[in-house]
Image (tube, grey):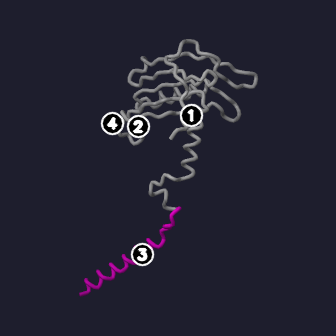
């Protein structure tokens, strides 16, 4: 009989503890929306808009074809057909009112070398807004880095310390019309 009373007291205490814990949860809609995979965050859509704007205004774009996703899972053949393994990464040309396109290009190349184990292939595209064309200047082969192709670019520094692309020293690997990333 004592064991039964002891068990019932423990159950009652555990129920009280659970009720207190549930009461301490903040369950208003704003505080739990991040747990529900809510896609309508203003911050997230602002970041997406900023990312698309950067893709439309940068001088260089890195197009990366990943082998694995951010959790280390291999992409399936179907996902690769749908293009889910492809990401565009814009270059950051301007930092604190100083434009350095040479550093931006070197940063993208360094990204390819640092993430070589996750990348299947990559390419860097030079955007010429005046001509309205995109030039493929770098084709990265992650499995065989020696087989990668690169078109040399000449840079010019002005009197204010800004470094800009002057011209290509060789013919580009490929030429296309400019693509816009504003479409959803």
Judge left or right: residue 134 versus residue 36. Answer: right
The mark that comes first in sequence, 3 or 2, is 3
Q: Is residue 171 above or below residue 121?
A: above
Query: In this view, which residue lies farthest toward the right?
Result: 159
N-term-proximal mark, 3 vs 1: 3
Determine which residue is flagged by label 4: 78
Q: Find disc 1 in the rendering and name its residue.
A: 55
Snapshot quadrant of residue 5: bottom left
What residue appears at the point 71 percent right and 34 percent down from the top-left corner?
A: 97
Does the CB distance between marks 3 and 4 fall below 8 Å? no
Which residue, given by chain and number where applicable, does mark 3 sit on?
19
List the single residue furthest toward the bottom. 1
Query: From the viewer's perspective, is the residue at label 3 or at label 1 nearer?
Result: 1
Seen at 41% across and 25% down, the residue is: 142
Earlier residue among tags 4 and 2:
4
**Highlighted range, magenta:** 1-30
């Amino acid at each position: 009989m004592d064991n039964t009373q002891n068990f019932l007291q423990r159950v009652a205490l555990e129920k009280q503890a659970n009720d207190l814990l549930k009461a301490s949860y903040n369950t208003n809609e704003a505080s739990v929306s991040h747990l529900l995979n809510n896609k309508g965050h203003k911050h997230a859509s602002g970041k997406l808009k900023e990312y698309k704007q950067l893709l439309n205004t940068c001088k260089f774009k890195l197009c990366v074809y990943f082998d694995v996703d951010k959790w280390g899972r291999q992409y399936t053949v179907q996902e690769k057909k749908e293009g889910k393994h492809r990401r565009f990464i814009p270059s950051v040309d301007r930092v604190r009112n100083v434009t350095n396109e040479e550093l931006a290009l070197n940063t993208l190349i360094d990204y390819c070398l640092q993430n070589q184990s996750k990348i299947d292939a990559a390419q860097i595209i030079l955007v010429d807004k005046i001509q309205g064309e995109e030039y493929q200047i770098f084709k990265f082969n992650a499995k065989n880095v020696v087989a990668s192709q690169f078109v040399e670019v000449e840079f010019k520094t002005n009197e204010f310390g800004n470094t800009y692309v002057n011209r290509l020293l060789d013919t580009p690997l490929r030429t296309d019309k400019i693509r816009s990333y504003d479409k959803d």
